[in-house]
Image (cartoon, rainbow, N blue to C red):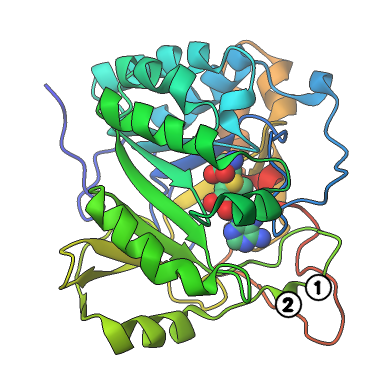
Amino acid sequence: MTLQHSAANPIEPAGGAMVDPFGRHITYLRVSVTDRCDFRCVYCMAENMTFLPKADLLTLEELDRLCSAFIAKGVRKLRITGGEPLVRKNIMWLFSALSRHLQNGDLDELTLTTNGSQLKRIAAGLVAAGVRRINVSLDTLDATRFRAITRWGDLAQVMDGIRAAQAAGLHIKINMVALKNTNEHEIEKMLHWCHGEGMDLTLIETMPLGDIEGDRTDQYLPLSAVRARLMDRLTLEDIPYRTGGPARYVRVRETGGRVGFITPLTHNFCESCNRVRVTCTGTLYMCLGQDDAADLRAPLRASASDDLLRAAIDEAISRKPKGHDFIIDRRGQKPALGRHMSMTGG
Ligand code: SAM
């Protein structure tokens, strides 16, 4: 029998619950399985990135052990991300291994965020491993603009991937980063396309993460302006729908579909933050917008038992901050945080 779990009445998990100093239960883990990517999106990476030596990465077996320890400590939703998670060699081994937690009821959802480039090859395997919903990042439907934004990407390949995922039965949500002067005039078109395909759309503001060889204030487009523009032409109705994430959703009356808004530069989601992130080297970040972190690789490798790992997780959760410190500095051009999104996992 599957035990029912709710934030209001959590069942103490076998490994001890993770509750931070502000009473927030940590039930959502995002794990970056690689810092590498086959795209070089202009707001995410510099073109010439130096990636981690492979030896620094957790092995797939270590990632499985780490995720399983978090699940034993009450994680109910696990998102695999990157870099591009589907370019990690043998990544399907990890999905297959983790699917046991879905089968025995310890995990509610196993999901991923992907740029879609490898989906054609992998969609059916994901379904076999119990994945039901995925997020695909797609900032434009124009092939030339797609190449300009991703530097290396091929829109046709991503579209093939989306079709394959739909055919395999995966529910897709499209994530679109709203970029000033780049794709801002395409947002309504994207909305109609997504809703016509039965997919939700989430719009994301650019976050000041990592050096990208450019000025971020050039890219920053406040979603309040996007929303106001959409409201000139469409009827947006606030709805209570939540996915456990930071997005605030509206229903578009004309299409019947949903649009989410993620505005990370406001603090509107820190109070309900239920998540932590682990990088591919086993560094635990308690907040996307803060530098404080804990090394889990050393305790993981120090012994075959999970005791040290569990203790390190508990200690880190006791330091989870109340909220983030994002600012886009309009005088200097320094990112608010030195690390890229591809390292922490978007
Ligand atoms: N490669 C996968 C993908 O493309 O979805 C997963 C990793 S990617 C870093 C995750 C998400 O973060 C993508 O939707 C990407 O557009 C977004 N992202 C990357 N850098 C960002 C930034 N500085 N601000 C806002 N979103 C960002």
Q: Is residue 311 left or right of residue 239?
A: right
Q: Residue at x 84, y 87 (%)?
A: 331
Q: Position of residue 34 (x, y in %)?
A: 67, 30
Q: Quadrant of the N terminus?
A: top left
Which residue is under mark 1? 215
Residue 303 x/y as whole percent: 68, 14
Q: Quadrant of residue 160?
A: top left
Q: Position of residue 88 (x, y in %)?
A: 64, 22
For the residue pair 143 and 174, the one nearer the viewer reads as 143
Residue in the foreground of this view, choosing between 149 and 82: 149
Q: Is mark 1 within 8 Å of ligand 1?
A: no
Note whether residue 23 is visible. no
The residue at the far left in this view is 1
Q: Secondary structure at mark 2?
A: helix
Is mark 1 in CB contact (under 8 Å) with mark 2? Answer: yes
What residue is disc 2 on? 218
x%, y% of residue 278?
61, 39
Residue beneath the point at 45% across and 84% down:
224
Q: Secondary structure at mark 1?
A: loop
Q: Is residue 89 left or right of residue 26?
A: right
- Looking at the image, residue 255 sits to the left or right of residue 260; the answer is left
Q: Return the residue nearer the eye: 137 or 210.
A: 137
> Is the CB atom of the residue marked by disc 2 within 8 angstroms of ligand 1's nearest atom?
no
Amino acid type at mark 2: Asp
**Vertical position of residue 128 compared to residue 21: above or below:** above
**What is the crowding at mark 2: few (fewer than 14 residues within 10 Å), some, or many (at least 20)?**
few
- Disc 1 crowd, CA 10 A, few/some/many (<14, 14-19, 20+): some
Label at residue 186: none
- What amino acid type should be assigned to the residue bearing mark 1? Asp
Q: Is residue 129 above or below residue 310?
A: above
* Distance from the alpha carbon under mark 1 to that under mark 2: 6 Å
Left or right: residue 77 versus residue 306 is: left
